[in-house]
Amino acid sequence: MAACPASPHPLSVERGKTSGADMTGTVVAVSLSDRHAFSKAQLRVIHLLAGLGVEGDAHCGKNVQHLSRVARDPSQPNLRQVHLIHAELHDELAKRGFEVPPGSMGENITTRGIDILAFPTGTRLSFGKAVIEITGLRNPCVQLDRFQPGLLAAVLGRGADGALIRKAGVMGIVVAGGPVKPGDAIEMELPVAPHIPLATV
């Protein structure tokens, strides 16, 4: 399987290894779609390609693949090669009456056991040989309400300071390729401080 070597990325700074039980998680599901569809189909395994994304996925590419961004400037770098959502969000939504199985909100990798929304920009997640570097937050949009009415509001919240909290997962780039499948362990590596909080990409 062909894979392109990853080029240096501005977020790829000197790393600070972090270990501990709270720094590891598990892959619950993996999904992709070869079309620009809202939801993605669950698979037994997906293959990450360095510098590109998920092999066979509509959003795989060095430059932007989201249609609205392509229309604005197709030369922009693709900071949204891989979309991750935490299964804890699915649990929360189920308690509120929503039916949102893995992949249905468009994520490629569904995680459990790590607080992906709390990661700083540039955090790396390792899935065996495959490595993803987190670039930012997904900015949820009205497509969520078209999928299930009320879902957009359900994935937004407010912090104690009144700041908007976006809970619809994070985006990343692939810095090392390899397979990812349900049951794989996820190891987290923080960038060297000072840390930059996640913003939408």
Image (spheres, rainbow, N blue to C red):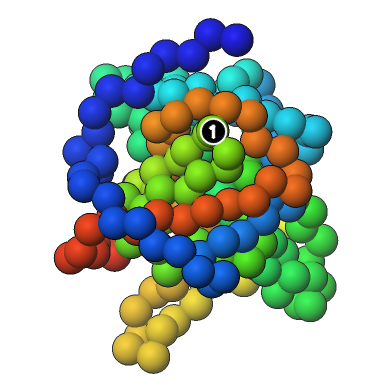
Q: Disc 1 on helix, strand or loop?
A: loop
- Where residue 95 appears, x then y in whole percent? 79, 77
Q: Is residue 104 above or below residue 26?
A: above
Q: Which residue is mark 1?
A: 129
Q: Which amino acid is tagged 1?
A: Lys
Residue 64 visible in this rendered orientation of the protein? no
- Specify few, some or many for label 1: CA neighbours under 10 Å numbering under 14, 14-19, or 20 or more: few
Q: Is residue 74 left or right of residue 108?
A: left
Q: Is residue 41 left or right of residue 193?
A: right
- Where residue 195 appears, x then y in whole percent? 23, 64
Q: Which residue appears at 28% of the width and 23% of the height?
A: 7
Q: Is residue 155 left or right of residue 77?
A: right
Of the pair 192 and 39, the residue shown nearer to us: 192
Question: Furthest residue to the bottom?
Answer: 160
Of the pair 149 and 127, the residue shown nearer to us: 127
Q: Is residue 24 left or right of residue 6?
A: right
